[in-house]
Image (cartoon, coloured by chain):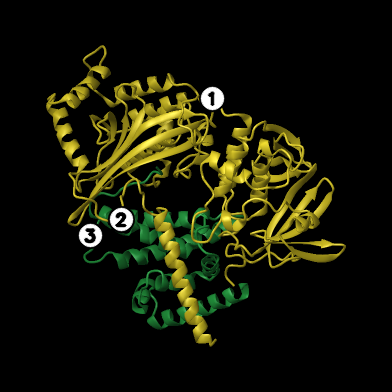
Chain colours: A yellow, B green
Amino acid sequence: VTRQDEITRTADRLRDALGTAADVMAGTGIGLREDHYPERPALPPTPNPLARVRPGWRLAWRLGVAASAAAALVAGIIVALQPSAPAALTVQLLADRASAAALAQPTVSPGQWVYRKTETDSVFPHAKKTFQGTRIGETWATADGTAYYAGSHGGSGIDTYVGLASLPRNPAALDAYLERGAAANADASHKTGTAFVAIDYLLSSYVPPPALEAELYQALAILPGLQVDSHVTAIDGRVGVAFVFPQTSWSVEQEIILNPSTFAYLGEADWDAAQGSGMESALLQREYVAGPGSTQPSLTPPTAAELLAEQAYAAANASWPVDDWPLTPLPGSWILRKLVTSSGDVTIWATADDLEQASYVNGTLQVCSRSAACAASTQWLMPAGPSYAVMSPPDSPSPLPKALPQLLATLNSYSTGCTDVAGDCNAVNAIANMVTGYVTSPSAPGNWYLLLAEIPGVTVQHVTDVTGQADVALRFPFSDGVTQILFNASTDKLVGYVRNGTETVITKIAQVTGPGSVTTTCTPNTPGCAAK
Amino acid sequence: MKPTYRLAGDLGEVFREYQAELVRLAAFILGDRSTGEDVVQDVFVRMHQREHSQDGDPLPYLRAAVVNGCRSMLRRRRLIRRHAERQSPCPPLTAEEAAMLSEDRRQVLAALAALPPRRREVLVLRFYLELSEAEIAATLGISPGTVKSTTARGLTALARTLKEKS
């Protein structure tokens, strides 16, 4: 192979990798808020639903003409809003009703699962074609937004739920706080818009404590220049009443829509009158449920195990990438782990896909391929459960089921040699193997952690591990195999496991140059390595 | 439901048209997706604040602005790194997306991310956006000859890194 051939081949590989990565990113929505912008391919030419509904209803509202049943509903809003006095519908009045409704809501635990079914309609004209789309989305997320299941979630938004507790509890201070997302020298309108969108985000993504939700509505009420509007949303013919941030030279009109009879948060919309483009998103259903995947209403607080699993899941996602690894290490990369166990300390090496393992036995480095015998000699985990290739196949999603009951059944079908098969010990062993044995995407372990909390008889116990660190353990009622999985009590990150009575804590994990090596691989984000 | 502003008027149209491509460009150059989104957002906000309309294709200007934004972001990040020993970068691909790429492609992207920023810029403009040497020269404000030599050096370094790994 000549040098020029090699350069040409490298160029081809680079072009291919960038193109495929761009396709993957496009497919998962990078840079495209899929809620706002439907796919480019032309859709059948149907009347623009927003255009049909909005001008008509706005006109009806302004003229006070009750032209149809829906208009009567709109008229009903006015009655609902004005039980006593002939007061006009004002931002303050709407905020007061919404605050009162919020205060009447139960306080839910931050770990409470919430099921949301949302319809999003969007429309925008482009050249000679008008694009429009409707999307029904189902998501499960905890009230604090830290754990979610199916669909995506804007978790990296303005504030985390934990931060909400420290938000100022008076409307003016709250606005000042939420406006900080705007540039320091931004004009008043930019700041108002920033606070408006921040409040919308908090209301749509979380279940804030009732007192805070009430304050958020009061904070809306004192933002300058807001309007109220009632109209039929394009969605399901639902009537809404909305706080409106009117269109400015720099922003389209933004709306926070409430249910006109319960004053609960219903949805959000934006509308660009100049372009005739917009988006409306409304909750078709929102329920407190017992767990991810369920749609049955249940305000059961999560169990201690479920809470721990949710937190561990959030911690696994938040801590990615591991140390300074910019991408998942390649399957064949060698990973060094330092293990502290109740029967001594050991350093072991394994490839990221765990197909090869290595350790020093009597001063000699032994390298073996993944097998029961090798696992025993290297003191590493059991070679059981889905392989790395099944869990993380190249260029395609994993064939493992995502729904928890099916995932449990699949994992239980692996034989891991444990006794309590009926009690789901195989699934626990397979999960323990995958979360500790493979170095790969953290997204799948999320589901696995949630599954651990559903194993019959699982309990949570605060323990001190062999390194003296305070941990929280998920304990399973098995006589052998993996009986505990340990998480750091303060960070919720996975630290180790107890298997056949031996406790193992992973104290160090690093990508190294090969089996037996302690030289850390220079990765693109390792300080001092990148500029070579 | 991450908060996002939609810009009014023509700029909104341009934003919708090019935002996704520009974010990917920035993410590849920076090796960091969320910062890439910020850079592109900033470019559009600045473009809006200048309040003058541009005639013709806005894309060359936008590309150059995004590359410039990436550079100042890298400068800022180096400063921050002096203070904070450890940063937690957001890779250009989410872990879930990375898992959808073959080993070979991940290896190529990792090797690309390890190159010095200027070489990375040239290679991404050349092999992701498929720009000509003249277009790259205009975007980066360097001579076509420098584009040629930087591309060659970048590919050589990339080939060497990939060879070491395999």
Q: Residue A314: where, in percent of width, then height?
A: 56, 42
Residue for badge 2: B15
Question: What is the three-letter code of the residue carrying label 3?
Answer: Ser
Question: Which quadrant of the rendered structure holds the C terminus of chain A?
Answer: bottom right
Disc marking residue A300? 1
Give the residue furthest to the bottom. Answer: A2
Chain at tag 2? B
Residue at image coords 22%, 20%:
A76
Crowd around label 3: few <14 · some 14–19 · many ≥20 (10 Å): few
Q: Chain of mark 3?
A: B
Q: Position of residue A524 (x, y in %)?
A: 57, 65
**Distance between mark 2 and mark 1 Cα atoms:** 45 Å
Residue A340 shown left or right of residue A185 in the figure: right
Q: Residue B53, labelled with which disc?
A: 3
Marks 2 and 3 sit apart, C-alpha to C-alpha, by 14 Å
Please, which chain is the residue tagged with disc 1 on?
Answer: A
Seen in the picture, residue A340 relative to A263 is either above or below; the reply is below
Q: Are marks 2 and 3 in contact (CB under 8 Å)?
A: no
Say what secondary structure mark 3 lies in.
loop
- The answer to which of A246 and A469 lies nearer the viewer is A469
Residue at mark 1 shares a chain with residue at mark 3: no
Q: Position of residue A390 (x, y in %)?
A: 57, 55
Residue situated in front as seen by the camera: A216 or A487: A487
